[in-house]
Image: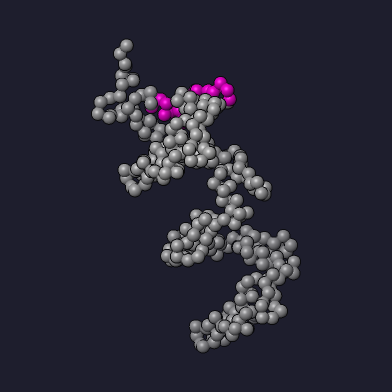
Amino acid sequence: MESSHFDVPPAGGEKPHACDTCGRRFALEKHLQTHMLIHSGEKPYACNVCSHASTTSANLKSHMRTHGEKSYMCVICSYRCRQLTSLKAHMRTHTGEKPFACDTCDYKCMSSNNLKRHKRSHTGEKPYACDTCDYRCTQLFHLKSHIRTHTGEKPYACDTCDYRCSNMNCLKEHKRIHTGEKPYACDTCDYRCRHLSSLKTHIRAHTGEKLYACDTCDYRCSEVAKLKLHKRIHTGEKPYVCDICSYSYSHLSSLKVHFRTHSGEKPYACDKCEYKCTSSKYLKQHKGIHTGEKPYACDTCDYRCSRMRTLKQHKYIHTGEKPYA
């Protein structure tokens, strides 16, 4: 029986069949139809043992092996699997072989799937779409994690405390609180941290890079959190309110210091005398008594002092202002 045009790819590598959702093109119409199931969410191939369903018969066959034995075994470690291709991919973790190379940059990896995902960083393709909002992404597991922001599901639980989260990466980062692990290290100084984002922020202290700019004044900073705090100068926002006296602050740290005026707690102690205070700032100012340090200088005369408040009072001599009138 002759093959129809439906089964035979056109000559010359032509891909005439285009997805009208993401633009991806295919040589055969049946491949396009299979691809469209990604966008529709339809999974017509169902497992007769469990509730698993797949978009293609090949994926279902692969899944069915999970109900059978793991006949392929690594000769170096205890790894076992159900597919020869999985064993071959695993062996590369021992050999370090990276046979799949990007034709746009220097990226190399151990599997064709990883290369396929990487190439989306060049093409901008985002084939996975949320059916609740406009979110799109390059990888299925990112979409699954995103969907949990709508459902509120938190399937990953810490085995040390009550922490729960929506994705495995967040759980791994959280566990470092308990283990003390700090895998990210600065190559300029001794700084180490638990999160890659924290390292990137720290590196800006060396480079002087200030990516975040205020749209009201000339202020720039290296962290988006600092910019958010700065903007409260312009908005007057003070979201942190004392539940005892209703005094409000723009920074949480200021509220914590203020609360100590109610609790009487003075956690900062001078190592030269019996002085104790509610904040590190006050302790630093106090230590100027012992060191003789006077970091605050008047820009009109030679006067210097150890406290900003004292300098402000001094400046009234030059301005003639009567602040307490």
Q: Is residue 34 within the magenta segment? A: yes
- How far across and how far down the image is residue 239, in percent? 62, 58
Q: Quadrant of the N terminus?
A: top left
Q: Which span of residues is magenta-colored?
A: 32-50
Q: From what the image shows, is residue 312 above or below residue 136?
A: below
Q: Nearer the viewer, residue 315 or 110?
A: 110
Q: Is residue 319 visible?
A: no
Measured as percent of width and height from the top left, residue 295 is found at 54, 80
Q: Residue furthest front?
A: 75
Report the side of 268 relative to 62 (left or right): right
Q: Position of residue 90 (x, y in %)?
A: 46, 39
Residue 126 x, y percent position in the rendering: 42, 39
- Determine the residue positioned at 61% across, 40% down: 155
Q: Residue at the spot x=71%, y=79% of the render? A: 274
Q: Dividing the picture into quarters, in which one does residue 251 lie?
A: bottom right
Q: Residue shown at 38%/23% (left/top)?
A: 30
Image check: 60 left or right of 283?
A: left
Residues 69 and 45: in front is: 69
Q: For residue 312, which quarter of the picture?
A: bottom right
- Determine the residue positioned at 66% across, 81% down: 272
Q: Note whether residue 188 is visible.
A: yes
Q: Quadrant of the C terminus?
A: bottom right
Q: Is residue 318 magenta?
A: no
